[in-house]
Image: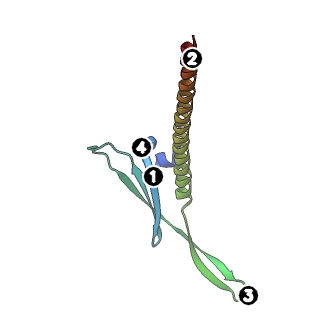
Amino acid sequence: MSQHPTLTEMGITSFESISKYTLRQEGDFDILKIYYKREKGSFLPRSKKFRFGRATRTVMVDSGRQQWQEVSEISPFLLRALTELNKLAHEENKAADNKESILEDLVHLERIMAEKLAEIRAKIDQL
């Protein structure tokens, strides 16, 4: 079972290749565009576009005057897809944070080792 069932249902399989996404509204549609990281010369598409219809419903604006207004809402399916995309982005940021943390640890270790080596050399010079 996929960790990202909505994205899988949309035909997306290479989750690790997703670099970013955009969402915009055009009339009665929401347009989700997913961008991929691709190697130079790759024949795979750099992006995929998905259209989602917006649901419209009538809501009461002013109960005293009995005024109603039509409002459009984002598709629940699209909301699930966005949740999964945000989760993927969070996981990627977490991996980047882990890499940064490891690099900081490495720099710290190099500094400590340099100081310790200098201390040992100083002791050798005193002998």
Compared to 86, does 91 lie above or below? above
Measured Cα–Cα span from mark 4 to mark 1: 9 Å
Foreground tag (4 vs 3): 4
Residue tagged 1: 20
Q: Are marks 4 and 3 in contact (CB under 8 Å)?
A: no
Q: Is 126 situated above or below 68?
A: above
Residue depicted at x 57% and y 10%: 127
Q: Which mark is first along the chain, 3 or 2?
A: 3
Whether pointer 2 and pointer 3 mark residues with C-beta atoms closer than 8 Å, the reply is no
User: Disc 2 designates what residue?
Assistant: 120
Q: Classify mark 2: residues with Cα within 10 Å, few (<14), some (14-19) or many (20+).
A: few
Amino acid under label 4?
Answer: Ser
**Which amino acid lies under the numbered mark 2 shown in the image of this protein?**
Ile
Q: Of callouts 2 and 1, which one flags the residue occurring earlier in the amino acid sequence?
A: 1
| Residue 80: % across, % down | 56, 53
Does label 4 or label 3 sit earlier along the sequence?
A: 4
Residue name at image x 57 percent, y 14 percent: 126
Q: Secondary structure at mark 3?
A: loop
Q: Amino acid at mark 3?
A: Gly
Label 1 residue SS = strand
C-beta proximity under 8 Å, tags 4 and 2: no
What is the number of the mark on residue 64? 3
Q: Nearer the viewer, mark 2 or mark 1?
A: 2
Give the number of the mark in front: 2 or 3: 2
The residue identified by callout 4 is 17
Relative horizontal placement of residue 89, taking residue 61 as reference (left or right): left
Q: CA distance from mark 4 to mark 3?
A: 54 Å
Give amino acid for label 1.
Lys
Q: Is label 2 in a helix, a strand or a loop?
A: helix
Q: Position of residue 123 (x, y in %)?
A: 58, 15
